Image: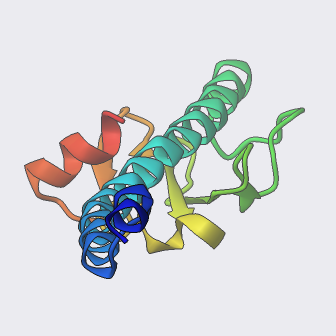
Amino acid sequence: MNHFYARRRGFTLVELMIVVAIVGILAAIAVPSYRSYVLKSRRADAMTALSQNQVMLERCYAQSFAYNGVCAGLPVFPVASERGYYSVAMSNQSATTYTLTATPVGAQAGDTLCAVISVDQANQKLASDSSSVAQTACWNP
């Protein structure tokens, strides 16, 4: 009989429950951090879209000395960002001013810290939350 107990291999229910608890704790820590990093990395899509549209508007201004002039290649706003995580709209448009605003859509809509990211003709960069923490977090991905 002793030989039977010596060969037995496997895990007890207590050992399995300890492993499940450890995996659960690690997952509870890792998943929110991962989601935060994903949201942060997608903000680069907004920066790219804002920069590209800003360059087009500056080209238009160089040709016609007005931001509201008719220029070839100027998009009809709102436009989607390259990867589709943001919608870019233009407001405050006049001969000498404009404001481009990127609003998260789809999978990025859960980004509450940087719900709206904007830039104007003076390259003043703003985020929906005007605190310095949000400004830094939104514009330095």
Q: Residue at x 56, y 55 (%)?
A: 93
Q: Nearer the viewer, residue 118 or 96?
A: 118
Residue 63, quarter of the rendered image? top right
- Image spot of residue 91 (x, y percent): 54, 62
Q: Nearer the viewer, residue 112 or 92?
A: 112
Q: Is 84 left or right of 88, judged from the image as shown?
A: right
Q: Is residue 68 visible?
A: yes
- Image spot of residue 135 (x, y percent): 21, 47
Q: Is 76 left or right of 54, judged from the image as shown?
A: right
- Image spot of residue 113 (x, y percent): 29, 64
The scheme the figure's colours follow is rainbow
Q: Is residue 105 visible?
A: no
Q: Is 79 left or right of 86, judged from the image as shown?
A: right
Q: Residue at x 32, y 47 (%)?
A: 138
Quarter of the image that includes the N terminus: bottom left
As drawn, which residue projects farthest toward the right? 72
Quarter of the image that includes the C terminus: top left
Q: Residue at x 65, y 19 (%)?
A: 62
